[in-house]
Amino acid sequence: MTRSLGLRIMMTTDAVGGVWTYATALSAALADRGADVTLVTMGPAPRPDQRSMVHDKVDVIETDLALEWQDPEAEDIGRARRKLRELETQLRPHVIHLNSYREATFGWIAPVIVAAHSCVNSWGRACNDSEWLREPRWRRYSELVAAGLDAATAWVCPSAAHRAAVDEIYHPSRAGAVIWNGIAAALQPEPKHNVILAAGRMWDKAKGLSTLVETANNEAADNQPGDEVRWPILVAGEAGQHEAGSIQFLGDLPQADLHRLMRRAAIFASPALYEPFGLAVLEAASARCALVLSDIPSFRELWDHAALFVPPGDSDQLGAAFDPLIQDETLRLDLQSAALTRAKTYSLTRMVDGYQQLYSALRGAAACGPRSMGAVA
């Protein structure tokens, strides 16, 4: 039986991407262990289906405070400082858990952890699209990210690969920890269908979905009368103005609907150029999908020997990776089994244990006085 935490935690989050999935799962597990958790949303309000992901023991306070990557010149930072410090006075948390950077500079009373999920600079480097980051407004963003890492009592990354990128770009004054993301349990698979599934926003270059589109269109163009029919490719996520072509774009889906697709899909593809962790990949693996992933450092760290890897941005190699999985059921079953086995490594219990240890260390150091705080991270 897990000992009750007896902690009050104030956690910021957003509802734009995977941070919401992470924050709702982590807060729910902490609440089950006896923590008093308040989620404070920033940016666009969560949709009704996203609100349904919040544990009934977790309080939610919605704000319209700007997300740092949507406000690189920090025009909203003064309002954010006032609002969030008011909430600290009201909630009196033992630990502040920030899923962003610049808010760590707000002069908190409680010890502060920054979870470094992503950043614009590491995105730009990975996508080979960073010229615009030299503009003054983005230099201001970078300064505040660096300042936030230095102001935090401790900072955490979801993979060693992303921690290395943060170290290289921002040179933080203290070492960061690695706590892999995790999910509650394997998604019980249904009978598999001959379908390839992917997930992500088409407008986000980092997701590499244009490579998947090119692969599908090339295969459609090469097919001759009498050729074997290729498997359908489904993409969950915003398509924007993109032409569907040979891919079925499903739009944004509630989590339950996406999980249902994962349980049925035989193959899950992520041709990402940049992915600090990749929760969708983990969810697909837990649903026993065979994984075809781009060969980037984070995916190698997490899925080596449990996926097929292709060079990022190479549509021909991506198509070539699909072919043996489509044609060879034994290979496909073996890779599905390997993905499911590896997915069990990234459990919610393991993730929560890591954060529980960190929170306890932060709280203990805070009780000993400011001189102890620097040793926590």
Image (spheres, grey):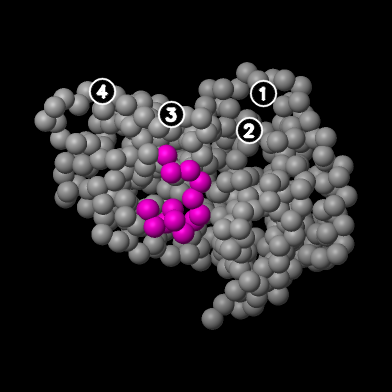
Percent position of residue 184, x then y: 48, 64
Q: Give the range drawn in magenta.
A: 249-262
Q: Quadrant of the N terminus?
A: bottom right
Q: Which residue is drawn at 45% across and 32% down?
A: 208
Viewer-side label of 2, 3: 3
Residue that carries the numbered disc 4 in the rendered image: 221
Of the two numbered discs 2 and 3 on the same chain, state the one appearing first in sequence.
2
Amino acid type assigned to the residue bearing label 4 in the image: Ala
Check if residue 258 falls in the magenta segment. yes
Which of the pair 117/87 is nearer the observer? 87
Amino acid type assigned to the residue bearing label 1 in the image: Leu
Judged from this view, the residue extending furthest toward the bottom is 1
Distance from disc 4 to disc 3, alpha carbons, whole Å, reads 16 Å
Check if residue 191 falls in the magenta segment. no
- 220 left or right, relative to 345: left
Percent position of residue 343, x then y: 39, 56
Residue that carries the numbered disc 1 in the rendered image: 133
Which of the pair 344/195 is nearer the observer? 195
Disc 3 is placed on an element classified as loop
Judged from this view, the residue extending furthest toward the left is 226
Disc 1 is placed on an element classified as helix
Distance from disc 2 to disc 3, alpha carbons, whole Å, reads 27 Å
Percent position of residue 219, x then y: 26, 27
